[in-house]
Image (cartoon, grey):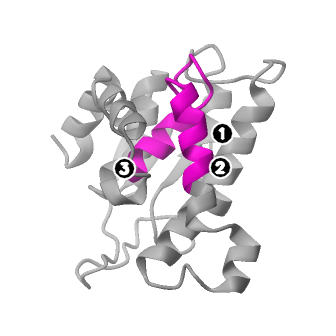
Amino acid sequence: MITLFHAPQSRSSRILWLLEELSLPYSIEYVTITRMDGSGGPDARNPHPDKKVPAIVHDGALITESSAICLYLADLAKQSPVAVPEGDPQRGAFVSWLAYYGGVIEPVVTLEMVGLGSHPGLQRTFRSRAEVEQRILAALQAGPWALGERFTAVDVLIASLGHWARKMLPADPAIDAFLQRANARPALQRAMQKDSGG
């Protein structure tokens, strides 16, 4: 059994969505986290070493960080159309996008949001916001999903960023259409019902 340590309306909401997409059996342990407004706080029940979310425990193994959890869960449910298993021709693109999301997209967008995105050293390290937006746009304009015709865990990550704040993704009709397609998925609707304990 998979246990998701989840704080409502946080990065763990995307993992709740992915679990629903993959049809994996799981339970939810609702925990508190320290919020941007100063509310909440660390929860002793949360096994994440930094008391953040998401975190999952599966057969005694702790997995943290969104991209790592997406890869781990997709590999558990390799028969799911949302997964891209080893040997699949799109496996390289799949794992590259997962790494790019965690290692580039989120840092660049976050740095931009706090006013540090134009620092030359950071742009050399991660890329500029314009470069990140162009890469996302190129994929989704060719789309309809990041890997083309198939919806995968990569789309869960990218769409969840737009759910958190629309301005974190490029201002373009292709992105609006992508988010509309993602929002219409039944698994997302089921996840939203469970997000706050419903």
Check whether the beta carbons of the residues at disc 1 and disc 2 lie within 8 A of each other: yes
Residue type, label 1: Leu
Picture coordinates of residue 73, whole percent (x, y): 59, 35
- From the image, tell me which residue sits under label 1: 71
User: Label 3 vs label 2: CA separation?
Assistant: 20 Å
Magenta stretch, residue numbers: 133-161
- From the image, tell me which residue sits under label 2: 68
Which-is-in-front pick, marks 3 and 1?
A: 3
189, above or below 8, in the image: above
- From the image, tell me which residue sits under label 3: 162
- Residue 62 is at least partly visible in this image: no
Question: How busy is the neighbourhood of tag 2: few (under 14 within 10 Å), some, or many (20 plus)?
Answer: some
Q: Residue at x 34, y 77 (%)?
A: 34
Picture coordinates of residue 44, whole percent (x, y): 40, 73
Disc 1 is placed on an element classified as helix
From the viewer's side, name the closer residue of 84 and 105.
Answer: 105
From the viewer's side, name the closer residue of 133 and 5.
Answer: 133
Q: Residue at x 68, y 75 (%)?
A: 123
Q: Decide if residue 101 is on the left or right side of residue 10.
A: right
Disc 3 is placed on an element classified as helix
User: Label 1 vs label 2: CA separation?
Assistant: 5 Å
Magenta stretch: includes residue 121: no
Residue type, label 2: Ala
Magenta stretch: includes residue 157: yes
